[in-house]
Image: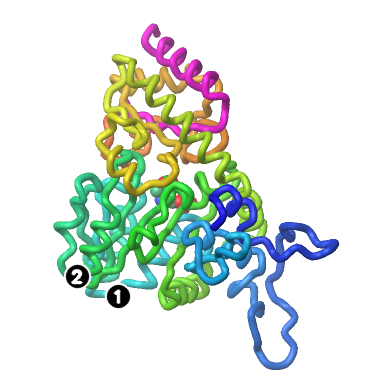
Amino acid sequence: MTGDGTRAVRAGLPEPRANEPALPGPAFAAHYHLPGEVSGPYTYGREANPTWAALETAIAALEAPGGPGAEAGAGTEAEAEAVTFPSGMAAISAVFLSQLRPGDTAVLPSDGYQLLPALRERLEAFGIAVRTAPTAGDAQLAALEGARLLWIESPSNPGLDVCDIRRLADAAHRRGALVAVDNTLATPLGQRPLELGADFSVASGTKALTGHGDLLLGYVAARDPRLTAAVRNWRKVAGAIPGPMEAWLAHRSLATLQLRVDRQAATALALAEALSDRPEVTGLRHPGLPSDPAHDLALQQMRGGRFGCVVSFVLPDRAYAERFLTALRIVDEATSFGGVRSTAERRGRWGGDAVPEGFIRFSVGVEDTEDLIADVLAALDDAACS
Ligand SMILES: Cc1ncc(COP(=O)(O)O)c(C=O)c1O
């Protein structure tokens, strides 16, 4: 089987044909020629689009490489299917709303992405019971009895805790529950939830997967065709379809995925090491840091030393954190993460996460490592002096 970089470059491309582009351009079509009887695959624009189809083939090959012909071919074959969405939240909602019925129970992380509580409210309004537990220490184990769906976010955003996906998935399956993992932070090159036993791998492609901070996208990948069929059907009914331009840009960006995630992970670790020497920095978290509480588990289930591009830490108070952010010169103050340009923000400004006022979520880009670390250390010096 080919390596991650080769797969990322070739995944989802059509067979080379004389005088055709390697990656065909976006297909803009609300409808397709459809004479006579209805026949697939392309009928109406809400149901299918060749640009999504190519991207979905590519994502499936990254989330679950293998399948018939994998050894002989270019390594872009997959043992799963992916369904793309216009945002990560559309993908997440599609799993919950296609799988759960009134009376079901879902188990969610209490420290996951900040919109999960809003989703919880919606689910409860539909008669679905929701239990929550923190990510660290596999705490969701204790909440599984009678559940229909376990939702895992590992590493979690923004706290960067990690749980044992295989252990939780085995325990959930023994109780008849489905398991979904939000794989946004790791990307499929850093973690393959389906291989670790999850039924769904779900992600916001807005972040590191596409990596340029210029589009929103989401996807759901699963091995069981009945699960992907239900998610695909939900997409059609909800009309939550990605734009062809976004899908094409995302596919184009996959070619550099390995380069970006490797560089970002290496710099994130170097930055975390530099921050660990600073007395004003507390609560430093990065799963790649050997001293991090999540490191051993991350090492066991994440791949290729790719522990993600996010480093989180706490500065003494809100004003200190704001001075630090203002003093950064090559880091944009912005939300989101995973982009080629480093960004940072005081997470408490949103009010959704249970974090201290001085909590910084830092997303490492692809700048030169030395430049980035120098900028961060200088900004810390500035924040201390002001
Ligand atoms: C872990 C995680 N999951 C899901 C989402 C939602 O993705 P989107 O913004 O593409 O809807 C985010 C967004 O920040 C996220 O961080």
Is residue 120 or residue 218 the one in the foreground?
A: 218
The boundaries of the magenta stretch are 357-386
Q: Is residue 145 left or right of residue 39?
A: left
Q: Position of residue 279 (x, y in %)?
A: 29, 14
Could you give the CA–CA distance between mark 1 and mark 2, rounded to whole angstroms? 17 Å
User: Residue 83: in sight, yes or no?
Assistant: yes
Q: Position of residue 172 (x, y in %)?
A: 23, 65
Vertical position of residue 70 compared to residue 252: above or below: below
Query: Which part of the image, by quadrant, shows the N terminus?
Result: bottom right
Is residue 211 or residue 22 the one in the foreground?
A: 22
Label 2 element class: loop
Q: Position of residue 5 (x, y in %)?
A: 58, 47
Name the residue located 56 percent from the left edge and 39 percent from the top edge: 260
Disc on res. 352:
none
Quadrant of residue 329 within the rendered picture: top right
Q: Position of residue 207 (x, y in %)?
A: 50, 45
Disc on res. 175:
2
Amino acid at pointer 2: Arg
Please give the residue where the numbered disc 1 appears in the rendered image: 101
